[in-house]
Amino acid sequence: MSESTDLGSTVAAGGSPDRNYVNRWKILAVIGIAQLTIFLDTTVVNIALPSAQADLGFGDGDRQWVITAYALAFGSLLLLGGRIVDLIGAKRSLIISIAGFGIMSVLGGAANGFAMLITARALQGAFAALVAPAALSFLLTAFKDPKERVKAFGVYGALGSGGLTLGLILGGVLTDWLDWRWCLYVNVFFTAAVFLGALATMQNQRAEQRPEKLDLPGTITASVGLFCLVYGFSNAAEGEWGDPDVWGFLVAAVVLLVVFVILEQRIANPLLPIRIVLHRNRASAYLSMFLLGIGLFVQFLFLTYFLQLILEFSAIQSGLAFLPMIVGIAIGATTIPPALEPKLGARILIPAGLVLAAGGSFWLSRLSTDSSYVGSVMFPTFIAGIGFGLVVALGAAVATVGVRTEDAGAASALVNTVQQVGGSIGTALLSTLAVTAADNYIKGKTPGPQLVAEAAVESYTTAFFWGAVVFLIGAVICGVMFDRHAKAQDGEGGPVIAG
């Protein structure tokens, strides 16, 4: 179908202009803030943890749950959130979820004990699991022109990945200048902007052939299976793979997810229609996002350790040290795709992004105790950032455009699901390799402060090296999987980003 015909879909069924199309750039600003908010909260409390622990009096063993509670709820409920979007519409879903997210942020900031804080963080994650697919699905309905769509996905992807870094900066600033509670209270400003912006700019739309009811068996098996998967790998991050809390939950996850896939092929209104991932290019895009998640989250984790423990950066300095990566992500997501995607296509640019990410990670794997920030950190993080931006923007686009209108929420949710699962797996696997490398480095050597520092750097560089290997393997697999002849068609029949 021609572009002019595609743009003809900007007229609503009643003959009036499609409000979402007319307000598409305003809507992009609204969903961009929403995306920024939920990913910012993945990291904003990291730096505030010592202050929160001292204030509320919980132990070191409980500290990780402030992070894990959010990740568990977010990762395990995303598919459910996506199907709710398909059932009740994106605007309604976004308004309800962003309001709930803001309220839970206030509850967490006002926490008078560990239980109240963890409950608030878990409920934040649950509402975030509805915010993410609701926001992304608007890109599919509001942007009809393929060129504009590439730019919109770029902005969306940059704000999501940039939110992880901004969380580190904001967490340090708020903790040092105000109080750790403001790392949660600050969400009120973001969520209020999204709530009011959604009311002013968006029109609720539901597909005519939307699911009639929620797939309860699929919801239970997928949500519990994903919970077990994320929880099992979270426990494995300490390297104790032999514990029942690790292998028991991972075995349960595999069984439940296999049952889920079997059920989805037999149920009339599945939670995740299998047809979404059977498209060759779309499957490749989901794989690229999964593999990116494996290396991306670990890079933030171990680079923060290196900056604070080896270079002795303060919390604020550590956050600001990630600015080159943010700039790289912005370039990779918003500047390169509009210029090169029409000529090269996503089948070239997505593997190229993974190669750039691998290059930056390999460079970081050369770090030593004598390395400087400017000479050894700034440039590789910038290069890796460009790669991250390319994969996030184009991967999300290829993974979602072309799906049936009634599947937009489910496809959007799967984008975030594979990233979260990839992050959990990567953190567990690469942390184990890092711990093993440090232990092996120390064996047979005279203990001392310098040896401890060298062993720590050995663990970080090991994680960076294997992260780079994952990116390279992903580049090869995704490059082979992409069908260079296929061109996805969106729900309106118009052209989208080419494979």
Image (spheres, rainbow, N blue to C red):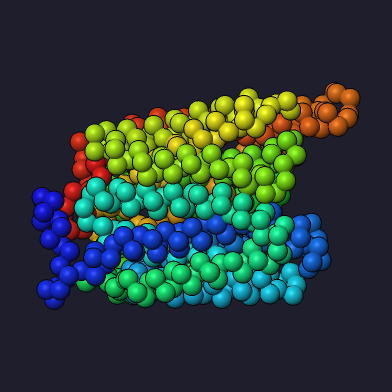
Horizontal side, residue 283 vs residue 379: left or right: left
- Looking at this view, is 25 or 117 the one in front? 25
- The quarter of the image holding the C terminus is top left
Image check: 12 left or right of 285? left
Closer to the camera in the image, 231 or 189: 189
Residue at point 39% right, 51% down? 155
Name the residue at the front extreme. 177
Q: Is residue 478 at least partly visible in the picture? A: no
Q: In the image, is residue 439 above or below residue 110?
A: above
In this view, 270 is above or below 236? below
- The percent position of residue 177, horizontal first and vertical second, equals 71, 60
Identified at 72% across, 46% down, the residue is: 314
Q: Position of residue 65 (x, y in %)?
A: 68, 60
Task: Name the residue at 34% across, 35% down.
Answer: 349
User: Does 454 sit above or below residue 308?
Assistant: above
Q: Quadrant of residue 241?
A: top right
Comparing 376 with 208, the one in front is: 376
Which one is nearer the viewer's eye here, 230 or 94?
94
Is residue 155 in view?
Answer: yes
Question: Which of the 4 quarters of the picture holds residue 342?
Answer: top left
Residue at screen point 69% across, 27% down: 371
Instruction: Tell me where residue 486 appears, x and y as whole percent.
Output: 21, 40
Rendered view: 234 above or below 212: above
Question: How many labels sit on residues?
Answer: 0
- Give coordinates of residue 29: x percent, y percent: 38, 61
